Image (cartoon, rainbow, N blue to C red):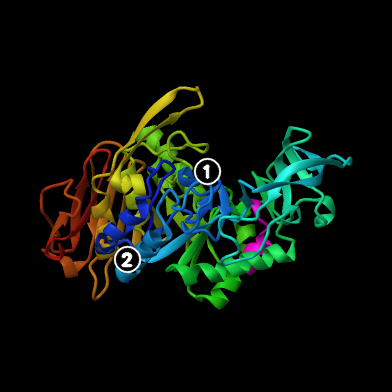
Amino acid sequence: MPGRTLLQFFHWYTPEGGTLWNEVADKAANLSLMGVTDVWLPPAYKGASGAASIGYDTYDLFDLGEFDQKGTIATKYGDLASLQKAAQSLTDAGVGVIHDVVFNHKMGADETERVHVRRANPDDRNQIEDETFEASAYTRFTFPGRQGKHSKFIWDMKCFSGVDHLEDPDESGVFRIANGYGDGEWNAEVNDEMGNFDYLMGSDIEFRNTAVYEELKFWGRWLPEQVACTGFRLDAAKHIPAWFFRDWVGHVRETVNSKLFVVAEYWHPDMDILQRYLDQVDQQLMLFDVALHHHFYDASKAGGAFDLRTIFDGSLTASIPDHAVTVVSNHDTQPLQAMEASVEPWFKPLAYALILMREQGTPCIFYPDLYGAKYSDSGDDGEIHEVEMPAIPCLPKLIEARKRFAHGAQTDIFDDSRCIAIVRAGTADEPGSVTILSNGDEGRKTIPVGTSHAGQGFRDFLGHCEEEVFADDAGNLDVRVNGGSVSVWVRSDAI
């Protein structure tokens, strides 16, 4: 069977206007034919910024573009009916539907409450002042536009562990709410950046509140009843106690679908930290391979000076491949975003070949790399920048190549710092391939493909090299790759 291939069907600057769900529906069948097995959708629920919300400023998890809230019925991506149509179109095409889950915080509260808080040091959240003082904070969520449909739960200050802004007195910072949970301390089993990385933004959800815990489990059961769902992407996992996702993932798998695909965004390159997190969640989910993404970024900047033999060193794909989701880019690393580390366009075909044609890891494609994107935004210099992310011309063929030719035993030929190859031997029923790539000049390799291929012709499926080459009587195949390029050599009679 071909390996799983995810597509992140959005980016940070996806245009407003409520058209994305319709685009998903229109492209579902073609994505399936191409070889995409799962589509990761953006957060589908109402955000605090209404029709402009990307979805990470979560306001109401139960408003999937159904209610007049935050100045709009539809979300940035469309209304409930178009979401359901998009998900059903994917399902009809045999493509899985992965939903983005943003549980860490809520924003855009409907009312203020008087709360008792303690100041925390923003640079070391474990340093919390002893003195408690009273203030007003936006911590009450009543969802007046929904009027209790789907859930009657009202969120108040006891549902949150911290906020970043107060009124009366007017003050910004990081404030621990005296909510009766945790003896005034932040949640444990979170990342230890800034001492304790429980708090990220907005009204930070208090997972130790049993009512909150049960409401989020209820939502996990409710969502698949409203719209097709075969998995979840868990946002901001390093800010959420691991015990919660361990229990939540187990619960939705038990009550919804035991085969749900789940990947968590624990954005950290250190393998020891990621292994500890996987242990804490009972190995129930996948993680994004942050280290490999950074290797791709470094390689794209260094050109031929980067040693391709080391590209997987220290990566999740090399250490724990069964739990690795590999990315070249995503919405957080694209130009003008906070974690900007945009891989140069020339290297993206090489990077995608490395994650699509190998057995280890589950590759995730980024929407702009498949379809292109143009947008503008302000940079750190305060100036407005026009950004164009070009579509990678050979990416559809690479996705198809994974589906058709990434089969059988794998041999990595990492014998040259500037030119490496990946051989897939194929199976009795499915053809294999030879993928060769170079970050320097034109490269050549002699690959033993076996006497069963003696005398057979091979062509570059990507079309970067136009000639046909033939395996010799001993089953050796001489293949080449253009400088700074990638080629996928397959049997001519398999194309």
Answer above or below: position of 181 versus 465. below
Q: Of callouts 1 and 2, which one flags the residue occurring earlier in the amino acid sequence?
A: 1
Furthest toward the right, the residue is: 131
Report which residue position mark 1 lands on. Answer: 49
Observer-nearest residue: 267 or 139? 139
| Picture coordinates of residue 105, whole percent (x, y) | 63, 51
Q: Is residue 363 left or right of residue 282?
A: left
Residue 240: say if magenta: yes
Report which residue position mark 2 lands on. Answer: 89
Q: Quadrant of residue 410?
A: bottom left
Mark-to-mark CA distance, 1 and 2: 28 Å
Q: State the extent of the magenta-drawn residues as a range.
A: 239-247
Q: Residues within 10 Å of mark 2 (few under 14, many from 20)?
A: many
Please report the residue visible at 38 percent of the width from the left and 53 percent of the height from the top.
9
The reply to whether residue 283 is visible in this rendering is no
Amino acid type, label 2: Ser
Amino acid type, label 1: Ser
The reply to whether residue 22 is visible in this rendering is yes
Our reading of the magenta stretch's main secondary structure is helix
**Camera-side mark, 1 or 2:** 1
Q: Is residue 15 left or right of residue 283?
A: left
| Picture coordinates of residue 383, whole percent (x, y) | 45, 22
Quadrant (top left/top right/bottom left/bottom right) for the N terminus: bottom left
